[in-house]
Amino acid sequence: MALNPNKELKQYYSIAEVAEMFDVNATLLRFWEKQFPQISPKRTGRSVRLYTKEDIEKIRVVHNLVKVRGLKLEAAAALIRKNKEGVEKKTELLDFLREIREELVGIKRGLGELE
């Protein structure tokens, strides 16, 4: 899941924007904050969450483990604690491979239309 290119210039993202990026609801993001202490967005005086790109990358790892790979929360948390760097690199690689696959499927579709 790549970030929206138009939003790459932003410093902070709202909970609604982050939820949309991962196709989850804001309630789930708040729940993950409680389960995964490494997810800790800044808050304004009125407790409005402000997510940085670093926060989004941490959410990407949790999303990959829980939603994509289907791990239970406890297993995902243990894996992150045990091998944080390895999990992050694997998540980046899987996202990259998904993007390549989407491009290849698009190219294949385009070639099929030419026949």
Image: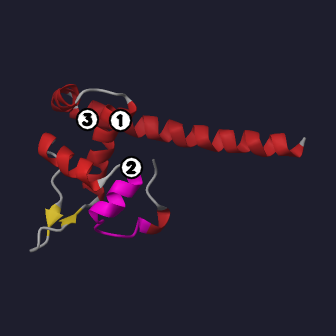
Q: Is residue 22 left or right of residue 28?
A: right
Amino acid type of the residue tagged 1 in the rendering: Lys
Dot 2 and dot 1 residues touching (CB under 8 Å): yes
Q: Residues within 10 Å of mark 2 (few under 14, many from 20)?
A: some
Amino acid type of the residue tagged 2 in the rendering: Phe
Distance between mark 3 and mark 1 Cα atoms: 19 Å
Residue 86 - label: none
Distance between mark 3 and mark 2 Cα atoms: 21 Å
Q: Is residue 108 left or right of residue 12?
A: right
Residue under numbered circle 3: 85
Residue under numbered circle 2: 22
Residue 67 - label: 1
Q: Is residue 70 left or right of residue 101?
A: left
- Magenta range is 7-21
Amino acid type of the residue tagged 3 in the rendering: Glu
Residue 13 lies in the magenta stretch: yes
Dot 3 and dot 1 residues touching (CB under 8 Å): no
Q: Residues within 10 Å of mark 3 (few under 14, many from 20)?
A: few
Across and down, in percent, residue 101 comes to: 59, 37
User: Residue at image x 43%, y 56%?
Assistant: 3
Q: Earlier in the sequence, mark 3 or mark 1?
A: 1
Residue 15 lies in the magenta stretch: yes
User: Which residue sits furthest left?
Assistant: 45
User: Which residue sits furthest bottom?
Assistant: 45
Dot 3 and dot 2 residues touching (CB under 8 Å): no
Secondary structure type for disc 2: helix
Across and down, in percent, residue 107 comes to: 72, 43
Which picture quadrant has residue 12? Answer: bottom left
Secondary structure type for disc 1: helix
Q: Quadrant of the C terminus?
A: top right
Q: Earlier in the sequence, mark 3 or mark 2?
A: 2
